[in-house]
Amino acid sequence: MPSELDKLRAGEWFCFTDAEVAARKAHAAKLCQEFNAIPATEPKKQTKKMQEILGSYGPNLSVPAKPIRQLSEE
């Protein structure tokens, strides 16, 4: 029987609270926090972190930051 992580990778229904799936989600959240800590003035570092998060990407990767207006509304 496939693991929950195998099901996730295959695009099938899976148990979100499975330990392996939860660990993968926590790791992804950590990487996103690290990305968000990189200043916009360091696009090469941002791109390197996005490659780590996504695994691969096309030639025109762009991840816009939240507009300042939205940040002040939170």
Image (cartoon, rainbow, N blue to C red):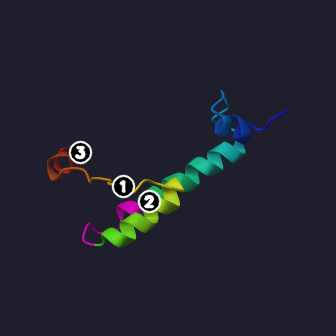
* Residue bearing the label numbered 2: 50
Tell me the distance, in whole angstroms, between the alpha carbons under discs 2 and 3: 25 Å
- The answer to whether one can see residue 11 in this image is yes
Q: Is residue 69 above or below residue 59?
A: above
Residue 48: assigned label: none
Asked if labels 1 and 2 touch by Cβ distance under 8 angstroms, the answer is: yes
- The answer to whether one can see residue 17 in this image is no
Asked if labels 3 and 2 touch by Cβ distance under 8 angstroms, the answer is: no
Q: Secondary structure at mark 3?
A: loop
* Residue bearing the label numbered 1: 61
- Asked whether 55 or 17 is in front, the reply is 55
Q: Residues within 10 Å of mark 3 (few under 14, many from 20)?
A: few
Residue under the point 19% across and 50% down: 67
Q: Secondary structure at mark 2?
A: helix
Q: What's under tag 1, amino acid-wise?
A: Leu
* Residue bearing the label numbered 3: 74
Quadrant (top left/top right/bottom left/bottom right) for the C terminus:
top left
Residue under the point 53% across and 53% down: 28
Q: Earlier in the sequence, mark 2 or mark 1?
A: 2
Q: What's under tag 2, amino acid-wise?
A: Met
The question of residue 40 being in magenta is answered with yes
Q: How far from the left and from the top, in percent, is residue 23?
A: 64, 50
Residue under the point 50% across and 57% down: 53
The question of residue 56 being in magenta is answered with no
